[in-house]
Structure formats: C-alpha cells, structure tokens
Image (cartoon, helix red, strand yellow):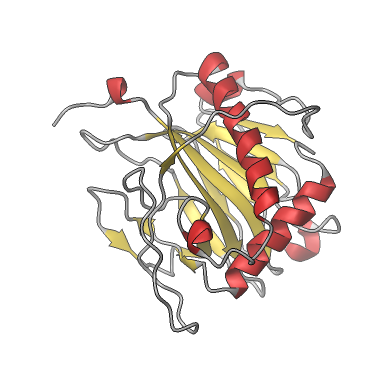
Amino acid sequence: MTDNVTSAKPPSPKKSNGNERVQKHKRSRRSTRRKKKGKRPMTPISSLDAVLKGEISVTKQWILPSLVERLRFDAKALRDANAFTQSTIGGRVGEKQTMKQSKRLSECCGLFDDAVNAPKDVGDSNARDTIMSLISDLHATLDEQVTPLGDEMELQYLYYPGDDEGFYGIHIDQQERILGKANRIVSMVLYLNEPDWNVDTDGGSLCAYPEGKSPVTVDPLGGTLVVFHSEKLIHEARPTKRDRWALVGWFLEGSNKRQKT
C-alpha cells in the first residue's frame, strides 16, 4: 500500500488527451478538522490498542451501506474520467519510484489532487466531503488514543482490476524511515466493494502477518475499516477475480518527530 507523498499544496490541474493514465502522481495534503453535524454514520472502532502492537484493527460496517455505494460510484466516475494513475512501489520523496507489475498491479486516485482536478460534475463530491470529515475524526481518535500524529495525511481511492490481475504482494507500508521527511505512522483501508462480495469466488482478501502471531485474513466487504501501524505490519492484497475498490490513507508523523538530515 505504498505510493508517493509530496508537499501539502495541491498541484495545478494536468492536461490529458483523455486516453492515457498518467504515471506520475502526488499524494499529500493537510487534513482538516471539521465540526460535527448531527449523528455520524459509523460504528465504534475496535481493538485500537492492537495498532501499536503491530497487529490489526478491523471494524465492520464502519460507515453506512448508502455511503459505501456513493463512494464507490464516485471512485468509478473518477476512473472513467481518467483521474486514476498506475500505482507504484516506493516512490515517496527520497526513494526511487518504480512500476513493478510483478509485485503490484492496481490504480489510484489522490483525493487531494487528482479528484480535485477532475471536472466538477464528475462523481459525488458531497460523499467525498462526508468521508473526509469522518476520517478527520478518525485522525483525532488515533492522535488521542494510539500515538501522536501530525496534521498531514495521504488519502486516495484504490482500484484492483478483476480476472486475477489486481494484487499487491507481501510488503510493509513504511519500509524504512526517511530523514527529514514526514513518515507514515498509521495506515487505514476502507473497503468500498459491493454487498454481495464473496471471498471464495471473488478473492481479494487482505492477509496480515503480525510478528509472533497467527496470520489474519480480512474479507474486503464494503464498509469494513482496517487500521494498522505503517512501520510494523507486514501484509498483502491477494489476487482479485472481481474489480476491487477501496479508500486508503496514511496518517503522518508531526514535524517535531522527524529526524533531521
């Protein structure tokens, strides 16, 4: 689940001929604290204490099915509008960006740049605003209950093509710390798949390998939220036989925690 991170300022819109999927992409923006407006469409997050231990927190039905459907529609519309790019391995500032399909095959769309730069009438921007508000609340919860976080985060839609093509081999999100940069601390995955997803026929499970513990398999059911430590948990996305959709994000460390060059 590793892609690149750049400055907090969204880049200018890119021109496209409508037929290409641009390989160079950027993923970073400061998260925004939003005021709560009424009842939140979410269930309490489970096992947050597992995150610091290098284990995995899994919360089913974190958001309502109606919001899952709207976000999936938004992601599909953005992909149809050529807002997605091919995912990379590495590619963070200070690392070499590679397009190694033997290790990973997926596409992504940054919510703070690619989605913003898409035509205004594409997708469901209101659903995007709703989930960003919920993730801002998640950021506050993690900051208070798990580990201190900075204001910056990365957030993107992720698409794995079906027919046993889409996958991501065994990896860890933050493989090594980069001096002077905001490193990833906590990773999140929110699945946006259809309610009839069957892992036996559709595949696409997340397999996690916490150190000293038995492997954990998570079915990518729509509305399921997964949270884990970016530097500690080894995991993989198994090949999918059906188009697989998710919203993924990384919460970054604060500037006072960064190691100086």
Is 83 or 227 nearer to us in this picture?
83
Q: At which x and y percent is residue 14?
A: 39, 69
Q: At which x and y percent is residue 142?
A: 55, 23
Image height of 40 relative to 24, above or below = above
Left or right: residue 142 versus residue 97 is right
Q: Residue at x 21, y 33 (%)?
A: 180
Q: At which x and y percent is residue 89?
A: 38, 57
Image height of 117 relative to 222, above or below = below
Q: Residue extending furthest right?
A: 196
Image height of 32 relative to 78, above or below = above
Taking the image as drawn, is residue 165 in sight?
Answer: no
For the C terminus, give its image quadrant: top left
Q: Residue at x 66, y 63 (%)?
A: 123
Left or right: residue 39 versus residue 259 is right
Q: Residue at x 70, y 49 (%)?
A: 127
Left or right: residue 90 versus residue 215 is left
Which quadrant would residue 189 be assigned to in this image?
top right
Q: Residue at x 66, y 75 (%)?
A: 163
